[in-house]
Amino acid sequence: MSPRNVLESQQSVHAATAGRRAAGCWKLATGRALSLRPHTHGVLQIAQGQVWLTLSGSLADLPGAAADHVLRAGEQLTIAPGQHVVMEAWNPRGSAEAVAFRWDVMASPALVPPASLAARDWECGVVQPLRDLVQALAQGGRALGAALADVTGAGGRFAAGLARFALNRIAPQWQRRAA
């Protein structure tokens, strides 16, 4: 099953291009919005922070009607196929804390072995933060490399300017001696 079949995302980086499965742990930065259109039943659970979301397209709603919800860490919402969810990180106190959430395809409890639940918790609690750390370190390394290249270039320009200055100070003295 491709990530597109499970979850369509209008995030800046699509799940398929980010190399991640659609189901699992995700982050939503402050000021960003995410649109979900699941093709199967699923559960949206907030792991960190809180979101403001608009849910539309439920069977009980009138066509075009939508309901707003605020979900905090630990709360969850079951979403049916065909529903549309738009959510954004929301903190009325103005904190810049990113939201971490989890999207899981609903399955019968008899079909989900306990080990897979522990594995998903491991992925959300350890593997995903480790991926984020590696990505941040790589970005920091690239920034440090760019800064060192800039410093080296500035040092070269400084040395060339100093040489020109010295030659301009010495050249008139050489001209006086030669005359």
Image (cartoon, rainbow, N blue to C red):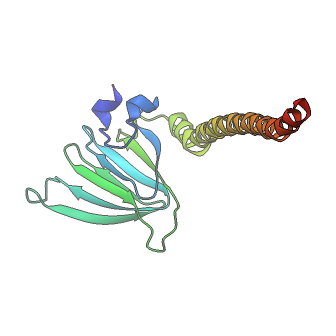
Residue lying farthest to the front in this orientation: 179
Residue 169 percent coordinates (x, y) = 83, 41
Residue lying farthest to the right in this orientation: 177
**Residue drawn at (56%, 38%) of the image:** 123
In the image, 152 versus 96, the foreground residue is 152
**Residue drawn at (45%, 32%) of the image:** 18
**Residue drawn at (24%, 37%) of the image:** 39
Residue 119 percent coordinates (x, y) = 56, 36
In the image, 133 versus 164, the foreground residue is 164
**Residue drawn at (48%, 71%) of the image:** 94
Q: Quadrant of residue 176?
A: top right
Quarter occupied by the N terminus: top left
Tag count:
0
In the image, 48 versus 35, the foreground residue is 35
Q: Is residue 96 left or right of residue 59?
A: right
Residue lying farthest to the top in this orientation: 1
Q: Is residue 137 left or right of residue 118?
A: right
Residue 84 percent coordinates (x, y) = 23, 49
| Above or below for 140 versus 88 | above
Q: Is residue 21 left or right of residue 127?
A: left
In the image, 40 versus 70, the foreground residue is 70
| Above or below for 56 versus 147 | below
Residue lying farthest to the left in this orientation: 63
Residue 102 percent coordinates (x, y) = 44, 47
Quarter occupied by the C terminus: top right
